[in-house]
Amino acid sequence: MSALRIVGYVAFFLLAFAVSVYWTFPFDAAKDRLLGLASQQTDMTITAKSLEPSWFTGAVAKGVVIRRASAKEPIELAQVTARAHLLPLLTGGRGFTVDAPIAKGDVHADVVEASDGMQVNATADGLELALVPGLAEATGLPLAGGLDLAVDMLVGNDPKQSEGIIKIKGTGLEILKGGMIKAFPVPELPVGNLDWTIPVSKGKATFERLELTGDTVLLRLDGDVTLGSPLDRSILNFKISFKPTPAFLKKEPLLGALLNNIRRAKGRDGFYTYQVSGSVKRPRFFARRQ
């Protein structure tokens, strides 16, 4: 028997074996174990209705439900697709991609384990904020408009080693009915557009005169966030300033009355400024007149 034929038989056997393992693998039995591990890593409870194979290195989870201890409502995703990278597996490392349709947009993340952390390249394209699960509860503001996000970062094992860049672009942003900030009602209003680039160096994300412009309000951010692990332990240290436009104040006289309640935060330039400190989980706001 020729060597070429032997190689062919061996290749055919390995392929047949791989296919049989692939199609007979007990994904249902493994589902709870895999999702349990994911829950431990993220400090959340993650469940799914089903877990199915997707080619040889991937899986599709359908009916995904993510529950956070501090949240009243769970986050529900119709489908999440994950796939392992072959090359890192062959060299003893780990890497994967994740794709999920969310809020009429698409979220994609490519993660590769490095010696000092994880290299993360992620994008979120065409998200409709009003449909993003859990956003209104997390921010206290029901938001609408379009959002694009791009992240290129090394997330360090030690958060102080994190380096990279974050880009955020928002269009047609609005605050919908029912918004609250520090027990004060926020009226419905169109906010405007933003195009921000946030550098991350030595574990600190810096906001340097980031602005949001619109026909109703002007907004500025200055300061930084020191990243923590988990993320909700990140330390906040920035100022947020906002100023309604004269045309909007004339159109909405009730807003002027509401602003009288926080006039101690109003500076000579007409901006209302607050210093934000504490952690992401427990932020604190203090009036800081400019």
Image: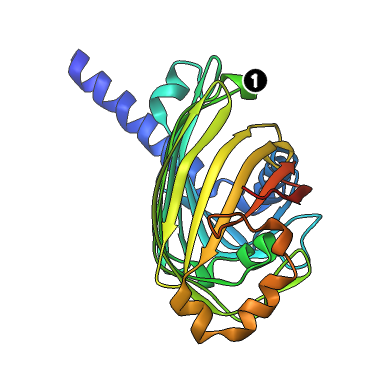
- Residue 250, relative to residue 236: is it above or below? below
The quarter of the displayed image where residue 97 is located: top left
Q: Is residue 284 left or right of residue 21?
A: right
The quarter of the displayed image where residue 263 is located: bottom right
Residue name at image x 40 percent, y 72 percent: 215
Q: How many numbered discs? A: 1
Q: Residue 38 placed where, x, y %?
A: 67, 43
- The quadrant the N terminus occupies is top left
The quarter of the displayed image where residue 28 is located: bottom right
Residue at image mark 1:
158
Instruction: Say which amino acid is labelled 1.
Output: Asp
Foreground of the two, 171 or 37: 171
Q: Residue 196 placed where, x, y %?
A: 41, 47
Residue name at image x 26 percent, y 20 percent: 7
The colour scheme used to paint the residues is rainbow
Foreground of the two, 277 or 38: 277
Residue name at image x 66 percent, y 44 percent: 34
Q: Name the element at disc 1.
A: loop
User: Going by the picture, which residue comes out furthest to the front?
Assistant: 268
Residue name at image x 69 percent, y 48 percent: 288
Q: Is residue 98 visible?
A: no
Q: Is residue 95 left or right of residue 195?
A: right
Q: Residue 155 placed where, x, y %?
A: 55, 28
